[in-house]
Amino acid sequence: MGAEYRYTVNGSWTVGRRGFASAAGVPQAIEFSAPPEFKGEPEMWTPEHFFTAALAACFVSTFRAIAEYSKFEDMVALEVDVEAVLRKEEGGFRFVEVITKPVLTIASAEDEERGFKLLEKADKACLVSRSINAERRLEAKVLVATPV
């Protein structure tokens, strides 16, 4: 049997539809609310944001690991937007689609194709996105940095 790791997070209610998420060994708790669409408060993190943030963080971490392993040193910057589509279906709401939109900036145009391949590899390898049953789509861009 392979390696197994466990991650435990505590959620606690405070007032209304607010609460805190915390984890042992992580110094800062995150205050959250249900989203305004579900009678929560605006301008606060929501479980839906946590879900989407987990996808974005996993993509960035996975890409960095793959780039490092592949000795891809041409990277200048990486940003990723993730859009998660929530839809009411029979049985209730669920995430039905996740669109990952990474923008990789590289130093040299000669590594553009390799950059795209590594972005695709990261999308396929990200353990969080592989663990969901929503439709997944990658809309990757590779830009070449303008010399200063």
Image: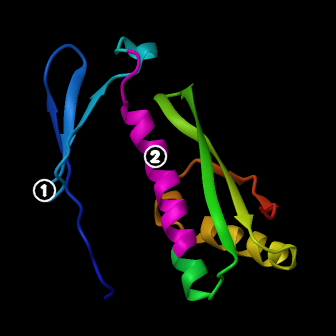
* Residue 57 within the segment the image draws in magenta: yes
Front one among 23 and 72:
72
Q: In this view, does 72 lie above or below 117?
A: below
Query: Can residue 134 be seen by looking at this rendering?
Result: yes
Percent position (x, y) of residue 45? 37, 30
- The residue drawn where x is 42% and y is 14% is 36
- The residue drawn where x is 70% and y is 61% is 104
* Number of marks in picture: 2
Percent position (x, y) of residue 94? 50, 35
Give the left or right position of residue 91, taking residue 89 as reference.
left
Measured Cα–Cα span from mark 1 to mark 2: 19 Å
Q: Is residue 47 above or below residue 104?
A: above
Q: Quadrant of the C terminus?
A: bottom right
Q: Which amino acid, by three-letter code, is at mark 1?
A: Ala
Which quadrant of the figure has residue 51? top left
Boundaries of the magenta span? 42-64
* Residue 33 within the segment the image draws in magenta: no
- Answer with mark 1 or mark 2, whichever residue precedes in sequence: 1
Marking on residue 116: none
Percent position (x, y) of residue 29? 20, 41
- State the residue position of label 1: 24
Q: In which quarter of the image is the N terminus?
A: bottom left
- State the residue position of label 2: 53
Q: In this view, does 100 lie above or below 60?
A: above
Q: Which amino acid, by three-letter code, is at mark 2?
A: Ala
Percent position (x, y) of residue 146? 81, 60
Asked whether disc 1 touches disc 2, contact meaning CB atoms under 8 Å apart, the reply is no
Give the left or right position of residue 116, taking residue 44 as reference.
right
Q: How crowded is mark 2: few (under 14 residues within 10 Å), some or many (20 or more)?
A: some
The secondary structure making up most of the magenta span is helix
Query: Can residue 130 be seen by looking at this rendering?
Result: no
